[in-house]
Image (spheres, rainbow, N blue to C red):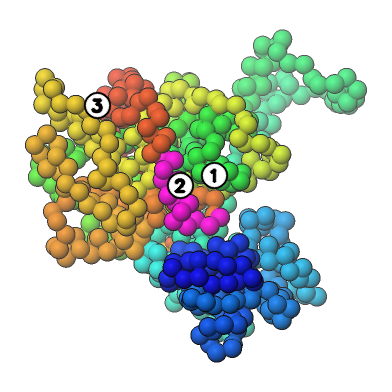
Amino acid sequence: MVRLMINGRSVEVPEGASVLEAARKAGVYVPALCYHPNLEPAGTCRLCLVDILRNNPSRGKKVASCATPAAEGMVVLTNTPELKDHVRSQIAMQRYRHPDRCQTCAANGQCEFQDLVGRYDVPPPPFVKPRVKPSLEKDGRAHANDRTSPALDLDFEMCVLCLRCVRACSELQGMDILGVVARGNEEVVAPVYNLDMKETECISCGACVASCPVAAITEKDALQDVQDLLENNIDYARLEEQELVPPQEEVSQSTKNTVSAGPVQFGEDDALEKKLNDLRKYVSVVQTAPAVRITISEAFGLPPGATTPGQLVTVLKMLGFDYVFDTNFTADLTILEEGNELLQRIANGGPFPMFTSCCPGWINMVEKVYPDLIPHVSSCKSPQQMFGSIAKSYFAQKIGRHPSEVKVVSIMPCVAKKDEASRENFRTEAGGRDVDYVLTTRELARLIKMHRPKISFQTLPDSKYDSPLGKSSGAALLFGTTGGVMEAALRTAYAVTAPPGGGSMPRLNFEEVRGLNGIREATVDLHGTALQVAIAHQGSNLRELVDKIRAGTAPPYHFVEMMACRGGCIGGAGNPKDAVDTELLQKRFAAVYKGDADLPLRTSHENSEILQLYDDFLGKPLGHKSHELLHTHYTA
Ligand code: HC0
Ligand code: SF4
């Protein structure tokens, strides 16, 4: 540990920590845009300069505190008048290039640049000269936007050149899609080689989005579509056909009455209610991913897991969804399909290893970078997509609606799920896309705040998920974290491979696959069969493990779980953004395991609504109907 003094406050930090990290620990504010706790320091924004009065490694010069290691005995000043003037002039320079679009910006209220402008009271410049891609035009025009990705949008005007996205893509994901293009005044961050996003090997993981301090890279906005679904669900063109258009005089009369006579009365007239219901174009169905119930609380200033899944259901009902269902239900379904696929491969001798298929960032990586691995990937659709298929078949049938009249919205902690939902093989002629709209957890928080600005999320009452696609196990909740799909599968595999007549105790906890190390491996004894498994999370680790497997230097794994985001979905790029450092990730992680331990049902194969679904509709795992609805194929 080293001890230093910052603005008169003494603080102790581990060796190797930067002066900036020491200041944050001491509770001293130091402005910074290019700093991010998960990335190597770049020292490019120059906002975090400090004076070091004693033990200054730069002999008296101001230094970038993010890139300067704290040393024993340092005496640091962060807030002298000269430093404040420096910060204000740096921000003013950025403001000269940054459009004034705060009110309609996706980052409004969550923007690190907006915070800096407010904190240092930097006035707007007389005019703004935004950054565009002047030297990169393809059609004779400079481009302010790249909207060609199915999951994210780039707005070059918004960029503050902190390079966090470039570093996240390369350091965390091992992908190197983005870079600084052009020089001087024309400098912008964009896909390298003058490509459009859709032409790159981008895997839509969203690590760039999660690290962006402004809204230069954002998830593709689905808020307007979802609001439209919830608020504009009446087929007005058919009003007349239903004899619901009052004559003109009556309209004005009824308007008067509404104003003077209070709220309109409903309830008595069943026929009218039925006619109104017939005019509703769609039944809106929403599904919530495992991790959303853990992290949504953070968007409302609470710690991870502080709100309950029941409160999430309540708020979704308040927003107007007709049915609130759970992706955890189809996570349980996935275990039955994927578990049987693994057992089938064991019986047939491979191909091994079998890789999980639920993470769309990983699937994109396989298709774009490692197509030779396609036969190794499980053919199961992800739980999100299984849900869409089941909602537009089994559930549509149950409520007597045509698949095209059921609109499915997903709430996901993931940016790549938008890409997944838009895939051509995830749509049917009858129902269109299996999943119509995907909102990230962040977008859901924005939607809630737009519609209920004063909501006190934690005091909402609990509601139950609707049936029949709402019941789920603790194993399904584990899907939200790295190692969770593996553990859920092991719980069921252990139970179904138990020798007839029993005698052995069920096994629920597989500690050997838990943890946050980037690559983990274990051998699990399934009643005499040794199953070799591995787990990796975060793009750079996926690549490292794949390289070993392809080089033949990895053990002969049977089953490998791959998740593109650090920590799995609880670290997904669609979660609330604030300071997702290791400490916060550990809290989310602990909340998942506590949630699992608290649930009465812990294993997927004991979920009675899943068993009912097989009895009523699917037949059996890997059966004909399952293949049609729950499995897919991949293309290079
Ligand atoms: Fe995940 Fe999923 S667990 S990928 O991390 O398998 O996004 O939370 O919804 O589909 O269930 C994300 C989270 C899901 C899916 C599930 C899987
Ligand atoms: Fe890189 Fe992922 Fe962003 Fe694509 S989505 S540019 S792969 S960080």
SS at circle 3: loop
**Residues shaded magenta:** 578-592
- Seen at 72% across and 56% down, the residue is 103
Given residues 358 and 281, the one toward you in this image is 358
Q: Principal SS element in the magenta part?
A: helix
- Seen at 32% across and 32% down, the residue is 333
Residue 480 is one of the magenta-drawn residues: no
SS at circle 1: loop
Q: Is residue 512 above or below residue 607?
A: below
Location of residue 229 by image quarter:
top right
Q: Is residue 180 above or below residue 196?
A: below
Residue 17 image offset from top left, x and y in percent:
46, 70
Identified by mark 2, the residue type is Lys
Residue 121 horizontal side relative to residue 510, left or right: right
Identified by mark 1, the residue type is Pro
Q: What residue does disc 3 label?
A: 620
**Badge 1 vs badge 2, beta-carbon distance below 8 Å:** yes
Q: What residue does disc 1 label?
A: 303
